């Protein structure tokens, strides 16, 4: 097994496992979900692996945390964010990472809140219900943005530090 592949995979699994801590601390939506998808897409050259490793990492932690009815929306968003991460492949720099991270936060907020509005039964299926649902999600959005930026910093920045210490990791997986 390629050492670069191993380092990337371990970093993703460790980030995914940190979901257990943030869940236990009730830091709702402060998760590595988007960062894992962006990081995997940016660094795994095999697109199948770029989708598979983050999805498996999420499945492992979801099996521990517990599955919920909105899981499909979260996994759909994870796939879309992975597609967004491919744009970072030849442009792994701070500004593009921050920009794509913020866009992924917005995408996650939009898809998951729309899904809650449509499928939860908590809100009337009209403009008032939609705006109430999205307004109720705003506090979670702050944690989503903070978590996405934090974990992108940890994953992308951490890998860059490791790569500088071990230049052989710069080779494609």
Image (spheres, rainbow, N blue to C red):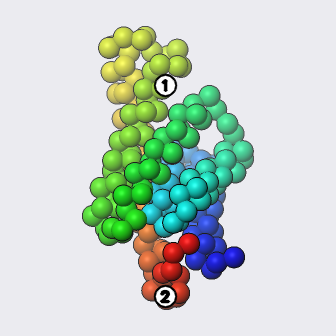
The picture quadrant where one finds residue 42 is bottom left
Q: Position of residue 136 (x, y in %)?
A: 39, 28
- 72 vs 108, left or right, is right
- Above or below, 3 against 154 in this view is below
Count how many numbered circles sit on residues in the image.
2
Which residue is more in the foreground, 70 or 48?
Answer: 48
Which structural element holds mark 2? helix
Using the image, tell me which numbered label, if any, was put on residue 167.
2
Q: Position of residue 82 (x, y in %)?
A: 47, 51
> In what quadrant of the picture does the N terminus appear?
bottom right
Residue that mark 1 sits on: 116
- Above or below, 138 against 170 in this view is above
> Pointers 1 and 2 in contact (CB under 8 A)?
no
Going from N to C along the chain, the mark reached first, 1 or 2, is 1
- Above or below, 110 against 52 in this view is above
Q: Residue at x 42, y 26 (%)?
A: 114
Task: Note whether residue 120 is visible.
Answer: yes
The picture quadrant where one finds residue 113 is top left
Q: Residue at x 37, y 62 (%)?
A: 88
Q: Position of residue 84 (x, y in %)?
A: 40, 51
Which residue is more in the foreground, 155 or 87?
Answer: 87
Q: CA distance from mark 1 to mark 2?
A: 45 Å
Which structural element holds mark 1? helix
Q: Position of residue 61 (x, y in %)?
A: 67, 50
Dot 2, crowdedness within 10 Å: few (<14), some or many (≥20)? few
Q: Residue at x 33, y 67 (%)?
A: 91
> In what quadrant of the picture does the C terminus appear?
bottom right
Q: Residue at x 63, y 62 (%)?
A: 13
Task: Note whether residue 21 is visible.
Answer: no
- Above or below, 165 against 43 in this view is below
Judge depth for marks 1 and 2 and give the one in front: 2
């Amino acid at each position: 097994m390629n050492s670069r592949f191993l380092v990337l995979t371990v970093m993703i699994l460790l980030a995914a496992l940190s979901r257990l801590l943030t869940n236990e601390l009730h830091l709702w939506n402060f998760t590595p979900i988007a960062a894992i998808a962006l990081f995997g897409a940016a660094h795994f050259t095999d697109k199948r692996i770029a989708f598979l490793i983050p999805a498996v990492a999420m499945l492992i932690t979801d099996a521990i945390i517990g599955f919920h009815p909105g899981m499909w929306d979260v996994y759909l968003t994870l796939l879309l964010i992975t597609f967004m991460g491919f744009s970072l492949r030849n442009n792994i720099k701070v500004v593009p990472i921050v920009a794509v991270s913020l866009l992924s936060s917005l995408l996650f907020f939009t898809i998951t809140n729309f899904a809650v509005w449509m499928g939860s039964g908590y809100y009337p299926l009209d403009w008032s219900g939609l705006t109430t649902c999205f307004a109720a999600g705003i506090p979670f959005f702050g944690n989503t943005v903070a978590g996405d930026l934090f974990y992108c910093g940890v994953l992308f920045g951490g890998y860059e530090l490791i790569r500088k210490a071990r230049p052989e990791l710069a080779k494609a997986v």
